[in-house]
């Protein structure tokens, strides 16, 4: 993994002695945070996992047994930890952060944001008494894997009509930002970063990009909410109803910004790049 100039300048000389805990360390984003911390040269990386023997972590990373959903399993986990990445689990965030505060953790980088579905997590972080930075991402590019089943089956994506643009972000870019902030000084404390992908695109443009890059038939078909739910249900199950309802949420629109580039020196992953890296999903 190559580093940008911004990443190479992160707290020179201090990283080998820093102790960072990554929660959700075998999850989609947490595992990538671990990889970016390793690339930055952080010396003591601890990875919270429920199955240390199956975690397959990089050499030098210490697996720590525990689960955010069971705060009673976290006794001693935060001892000696200076900074931590907090994966989103609002139901236990208050208790987890109290344990971190009591153990002397100085800075938590949390996945949270301004949209309604992040509110509980964001409030827990801000009221925790621990120094914090919140990353409020746009929709994950990885979410569009949900379209693969209906593209493969029908050659189309069925959704209610939408004319707004979004700026989806790759999980790897979220993890890259989290690692840089964890490895930096105090300049990020108390900051909220609404990080996005590098381009604003409509839903129609997303589907067309899949068609062009993957070389498959993929049309955007305006449908009723009921039909959209029906087409998504094989992939999303009961969450399909919730997801289609979010399409009418004003917070669903997010203009593109350059925060990923400003914070890391990396320009950010385009949707076309993400599709090319995951082309097998759509074929």
Image (cartoon, grey):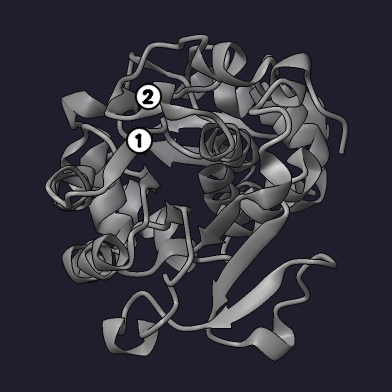
Specify whether 225 is left or right of 108: left
Q: Quadrant of residue 273?
A: top right
- The x and y percentages for residue 5 are 77, 15
- At 70% from the left edge and 78% from the top edge, which residue is drawn? 55
Q: Identify the residue under disc 2.
A: 193
Q: Nearer the viewer, mark 1 or mark 2?
A: 1
Determine the residue positioned at 23% across, 45% down. Answer: 118
Q: Which residue is mark 1?
A: 133
For disc 1, the neighbor class at 10 Å (few under 14, some 14 to 19, many from 20) is many
**Residue lying at 24% horizontally and 54% vertically, measured from the top left:** 242
Up-down relation of residue 190 to residue 29 (above or below): above
For residue 58, above or below residue 41: below
Query: At 37% from the left edge and 37% from the top edge, which residue is drawn?
Result: 159
Q: Quadrant of residue 94?
A: bottom left
Query: For this rendering, which residue is in front, 8 or 138?
Result: 8
Determine whether the residue tagged by mark 2 lies in a helix, strand or loop: strand
Give the answer, above or below, for where 120 lies relative to 48: above
Q: Quadrant of the N terminus?
A: top right
Q: Choose between 185 and 134: the one closer to the eye.
A: 185
């Amino acid at each position: 993994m190559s580093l940008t100039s911004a990443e190479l300048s992160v707290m020179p000389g201090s990283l080998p002695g820093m102790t960072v805990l990554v929660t959700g360390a075998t999850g989609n984003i947490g595992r990538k945070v671990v990889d970016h911390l390793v690339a930055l040269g952080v010396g003591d990386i601890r990875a919270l996992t429920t199955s240390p023997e199956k975690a397959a972590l990089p050499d030098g990373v210490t697996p720590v047994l525990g689960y955010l959903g069971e705060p009673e399993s976290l006794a001693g986990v935060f001892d000696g930890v200076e900074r931590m990445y907090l994966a989103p689990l609002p139901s236990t965030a208050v208790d987890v952060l109290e344990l971190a505060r009591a153990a002397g953790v100085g800075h938590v980088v949390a996945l949270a944001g301004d949209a309604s579905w992040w509110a509980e997590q964001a409030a827990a972080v801000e009221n925790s008494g621990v120094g914090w930075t919140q990353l409020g991402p746009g929709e994950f590019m990885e979410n569009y894997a949900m379209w693969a089943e209906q593209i493969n089956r029908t050659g189309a994506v069925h959704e209610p009509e939408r004319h707004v643009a979004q700026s989806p972000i790759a999980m790897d870019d979220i993890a890259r930002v989290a690692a840089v902030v964890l490895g930096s000084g105090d300049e990020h404390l108390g900051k909220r970063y609404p990080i996005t992908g590098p381009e604003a695109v409509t839903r129609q443009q997303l589907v067309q990009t899949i068609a062009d890059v993957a070389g498959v038939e993929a049309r955007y078909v305006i449908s009723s909410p009921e039909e959209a739910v029906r087409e998504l249900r094989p992939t999303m199950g009961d969450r399909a109803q919730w997801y289609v309802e979010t399409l009418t949420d004003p917070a669903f629109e997010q203009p593109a910004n350059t925060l990923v580039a400003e914070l890391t020196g990396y320009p950010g992953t385009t949707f076309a790049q993400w599709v090319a890296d995951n082309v097998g999903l759509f074929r």
